[in-house]
Image: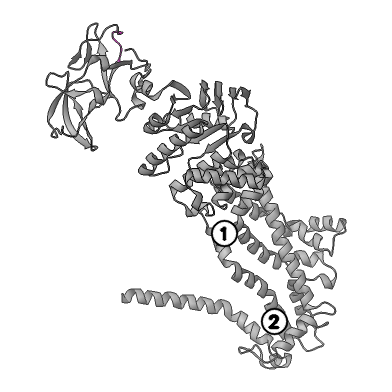
Amino acid sequence: MATVKLKNIKKTYPNGAVAVQGVDMAIEDGEFIVFVGPSGCGKSTMLRMVAGLENITDGEIEIDDRVINKVSPADRDVAMVFQNYALYPHMTVRGNMAYGLKNRGLPKTEINQKVTDAAKMLRIHDFLDRQPNQLSGGQRQRVAMGRAIVRDPKVFLFDEPLSNLDAKLRVQMRIEIKRLQRKMGVTSIYVTHDQTEAMTLADRLAVINDGRIEQMGAPIELYNNPATLFVASFIGAPQINLIPVQFDGKNLNSGDLQFSGFKDLPENTDLILGIRPDVLEPNNDGQLEMQVDLVEQHGAENLVYGALNGASTTDGYITEICFKTNQNTQPAIDSILRLHFDHSHAMVFNKETGERLI
Amino acid sequence: MSNINWRIILNHTILLIGVIFMSLPVWVAFSTSTHSAETILREGLQFWPGTNFIGTYREVLFEQGGVMKSVLGITMLKNSMILGIGFAIGKVIVSMLAAYAIVYFRFRLATPLFWIIFLTLLLPLEVRIIPSYEVVAGLGLLDTNFGLIVPLIASATGTFYFRQFFKSIPEELLEAARLDGATPWRFFVDILIPLSKTMIAAILIIMFVVGWNQYLWPLIMTTKEENYTLVIGIKQIYQILSEGGELPQYQKAFALTILATLPPVLVVLFFQNWFVKGLVESEK
């Protein structure tokens, strides 16, 4: 039960590498915040600074309005779940979960009670006397969470906790983590590079790029209204279609293609037209012409990939396009399709700055 | 198929020759030690065991004058044990603590310090034996177990092994322990030591054998017969052999040699599982 505030947090490593360059954030009590971004963007560093495992070069971190820059990790009252679980391999599950409590000098009976309660909640009660190497990946993950839960901390920190699990288990654990966090109401910060995980878990999502927050908000808000090209391309699977265009005062042009309905855009500037795969639909009067080269069947829906005919190239390569359709639409390979999109659903970005213009 | 069979036979023949080559001298020494001095003098080395086993070994171990004037074989065995065990335990403690400091405490000179420690590998005991003797003698520690063991327990090899091992322990364990409120000492005791168990066992075994076989240092550090170790005893008994007068007691020299090889062999035999595990284990 706590609020967390990051105030102009900066991290520079001794070798001069800048990992985090000025991040401000206020996390409400009980909120589930997800940091998402490509690897090396500084998201883990930020989490580790909250945990106290990395020094804070500049700025302040507050938990419940208390500045914790100089407080040791153990006294910050945070618990962390690591990517590789970091269970003590020589201790039993019980030993692993009890270790933090033992170091805090709790009486034995209380420790036992807490460990038992947490183990029941996580359904690892039957494994309490086993060692970590006798457990499956999913069970180890639960133990790691159990170790965090028994401590009853103010803040949970998750550092890509699901990335070592197989796909099916990952989905399962994702749901469990969300339920557990709801139930316990503990403020949580969760780091991942998986945008699906980020979208599904977060109350609020912070997209991080190059040590800065690109945009922060509710997941659906970020999906519908990305502030930058980076956020637009990072959030959403399959990825948003990006078509290189220029504005001539009336239309957007890309090679032989023209898109009308846009105005108030800078001329003679490289722009990017962004269209989500789910707003494109086959239509004989559509603005786009696509040569199909791959159909991915996902069960309920199909993803159709191919080249966008007539468009300018993207970085010297043929511009590709993808759209989402139902399982009954099954275009033949090499067939030509026309696709329609409503220009109110399209986004326009400045290619250079990544800034969203429309 | 027949190809492979030939190969196996060839391999085993080579191995067998190796085994015989290595163990035959030990066997001959043992056999000879069970004969009487007269037989040995008359007929030379003996291949088959004789009848004097109990007599010789009892005399060597338990009778005054059996080996030297006053010291008993069993006393020398005890002295060697103390040296071997003290040496091994001391080395493990010192090198573990040194490695712990070097790996986990990021003080400024950690890496150069490690390399300085490592460089001392190039300076064997013999190089510094006179200054070491001076120091120990100056402290009045000659002829004490303390003076015998403590100057030897700094170990570059041990520090190196433990450093490499600690470095292979995932960083997250340390971080998890820090978040769990473990002090540096608790982390060392609760987590590092249990994780290093097999490594500790391996180093204990190696160092016990090394300590047991120390010759020059105990020879210099002990002046009284009752502080002699077995290895020194062997040397002394050969000296007595060549001094003439009496009938040379070859069988006792051989018996002492066999006794001196026995404990290291037993240690390695009993603990070889641990030993191998410690050196090859990669699962953490």
Q: Is residue B178 at all visible to an observer of this figure?
A: yes
Q: Locate residue B222, reporting x and y percent.
A: 82, 67
Which quarter of the figure is the N terminus of chain A placed in? top right
Above-or-below relation of A196 to B66:
above
Q: Locate residue A85, reporting x and y percent.
A: 50, 43
Q: Which residue is mark 1?
A: B278
| Amino acid type of the residue tagged 2 in the rendering | Phe
Residue at the (78%, 89%) spot, across then down: B247
Q: Is residue B176 left or right of residue B37?
A: left
Above-or-below relation of B178 to B71:
above
Q: Is residue A90 left or right of residue A176?
A: right
Asked if the residue under mark 1 is in contact with the one under mark 2, i.e. CB atoms within 8 Å, the reply is no
Q: At numbered mark 1, what does the secondary structure look like: helix, strand or loop? A: helix
Q: Which residues are magenta?
A: A265-270
Main SS class of the magenta portion in the image: loop
Residue at the (70%, 74%) spot, across then down: B260
Q: Residue B254: which numbered mark, if any?
A: 2
| Amino acid type of the residue tagged 1 in the rendering | Gly
Above-or-below relation of A100 to B250:
above
Colour scheme in use? one colour
Q: Residue A69: which numbered mark, if any?
A: none
Q: Quadrant of residue A227?
A: top left
Q: In this orientation, which residue lies closer to the viewer: A190 or B171?
A: A190
Report how far apart the C-alphas of labels 2 and 1 lie in the structure: 34 Å
